[in-house]
Image: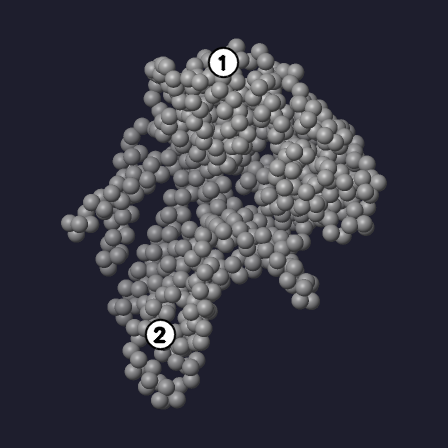
Amino acid sequence: MKFTRSLLGVTAAVSAVVLLAGCGSSGGVGGAEPVAQNTGPVTINYWTWFPPQATLDAAIAAFEKQNPDITVKLRTFEAADYQKQLPLALGGGEDLDVVGVQVSAMTNTVKDYLTPVSEWGDDLLDGVEPSMVKQTEEIASDGVLYSIPLGSIGSPVLYYNAEILDSLGLSVPKTGGEWKTAVDAVKAARADVTPVVFAGDPWWQEEMLFGIAEQDSPGLSDDIIGGDGAWDQPALVAGLAAYKSLFDDGIVSTDVLSLQGSRPSELFTAGKALFYLDGSWQNSLLSADYRGANKIALKDVGAAPLPVLNGGDPAVRALAEGGLAIPANSKNTAAAKKFIAFMLGKDAADVWAKDLVLVPSRVGYELPDTVLQSAAAQDGFANVSQVISAPTSKRDSNQDFLNQVEGNAILDVLRGATTPEDAAAHMQAEWESGRYPHGDEK
Amino acid sequence: MIFLAPLALFYGVYFLFSFGLLGVVSTQRVGLTFQHAVDVGWQNFLLVLTDPAFQISLFNTVLFGVVSVLISLTLGFVLAMMLASGLRLRRVFYIVFLLPSLIPLSLFATVFGRMLETSDGAINQFLRGVGLPFLAQDWLGNPTAAYVAIFVLLTYMIGLPIMYYTTDVTQVNASILEAATLDGASIWQIYRIILYPLLRTTHITVILSVLLGSFRAFDIIFFSTGGQPGGRTAIAGTYIYQATLGADRVGFAAAASIIVLVIALTISLVQVLVQRKKKAS
């Protein structure tokens, strides 16, 4: 009885508060009052998810040596966690001066708390690849540039164990037929090696789908995700069917779809997989130094675009990434700008670019000769960078739609649970349902 | 009461503010920055309720809860009685049964998720190793197999129900058990006819805690199957988590949270009313 009363009491109280709170105005931050700036020696707070902490520590040490009156206080996050932490921190008035922005995933969720680049950094854009600046600008729903990208990434990329490939006398596959030949060869010779691995997580399926579909239909992702194209158009249905053909032809086993998270990478770096599909953020694997430092016992790794399945050309979706921005409430804008200028410059690039995670946005930048040592690594990086520099679409996603609908629909096709046509129709129906704001609804 | 007042006020403010914010946001289209909110009235609730993915996740939440309850009331009860009856090495068994409930669920579920891999997963490796390769499954690709895997995972979670039963069975009047033994009752008859009915209040505690716990089982599902295959093993918690990932979807996620909260409160209320009715009769 008492418990019932308490329960009803709590329910009533909650309802009352909800009603009272509902009478208030919608949330939001105050107006754009100019923020008083600090003078003299300052400490700037820098939050990011990239580059890795060790790399950043080296870059920051070099910056502080050049700028003894500025101290950089760094906090790094795991990528997915950062997507939630940063908007909440900015909304809560956290004292931040420089923030890393995941250009595709985060620009629109944090832009309201950032100072447009036009107010602090137009002069820094001279040394930055114009195409990457344009991509960063266009990703914002209002077309304003809020961050300056350190580089760009693209996917999918085919990484391969060059040692195994060489031992079987095979060349890097450029077509579906050649890929099938290589897979059959490794199946016959090395039962302990999985021919092809990639993540079975829903999010990765979009990368694969457009990487395949855009071989015949460049710009398909831009048309659907960035434009007003339909998910059930013939080009996408054909892409789903082509992706499914990898499984039907025995190039990829459905067992691979049970690999979650970092498992594909673990298998590849342990020498248990010949081909590994991921994004260019795995380019670090091409570096012998990186492999040595991370105890990866692979002798040689190469990279190539995804083999062309049904004619057409290699395709990759790419986008500027690693945006650096200044929050609107920063009291150290000048120092923050200095730091961003440094990070975009050659000295810092020499520190972070050797990780190979991003293709640097600095115009004319070339990696130090010592970074890539084998022919497979050098050719692979050059080929992948070339494809990324002329992407078939922007690497843009509607994250919630991808995780809840799109990824699962693609997986159902791959597992034979539904047809490409039905999956495409389902995606289109959900896209139009109003549950996933996109385009002008955002 | 006077000592509890500050704490009650502290928690009251926190919860009421949270629920109030949830209520307001649920009627808006807004992102994590809570800026540029657009009032949409009840639209978020309508969109959530008509979402097939939400309906599946809600069904799974209740299903997994019911399965957990059944496991607790049967296997949990029997194991608890065995442990309470002076079994040898019972402390070792206690540790074995309680361990999955005591270590972080995310860690436990992650390890279990790895075991489900089709090719290199420990479960299929074991089945192939003992000569039962036909039982090896695509645990994350076949809906039936995925459900079975989750039911097995939930079975590992019987540590707390066992603890409830072993604690309460000590309160049972020993003379009743002695009388039953003298009358020639077997051990199973004592369990079924005497102890099971006597521990009715414990059953209710177990049912309520396990059922409501299923609404907080986010980490168990997220880190094991991740909702696979095709979102068919998703639960309310994973649905709401996914909903927060998109731009301008916080209001939608808030609406889903309120619906789930109302359902959980309703279950609690029904449980209390049933209990009261039983007491009255």
* Residue annotated with mark 2: B197
Above or below: residue B130 compared with residue A431? below
Position in image of residue B40 (x %, y %) = 40, 32
Residue at position x 39%, y 19% from top? A42
Q: Amino acid at mark 1?
A: Gly
Q: Amino acid at mark 2?
A: Pro
Residue A308, by quadrant, is top right
Mark 1 residue crowding within 10 angstroms, few (<14) / some (14–19) / many (20+)? many
What's the CA distance linking mark 2 and mark 1?
75 Å
Position in image of residue B186 (x %, y %) = 42, 84
Checking the image for residue A121, the label placed there is 1
- Which of the chains bears the disc numbered 1? A
Residue at position x 33%, y 69% from top? B168
Residue at position x 78%, y 50% from top? A190
Query: In front here: A19 or A153?
Result: A153
Q: Is residue A253 left or right of residue B57?
A: right
Residues indicated by labels 2 and 1 sit on the same polypeptide chain? no
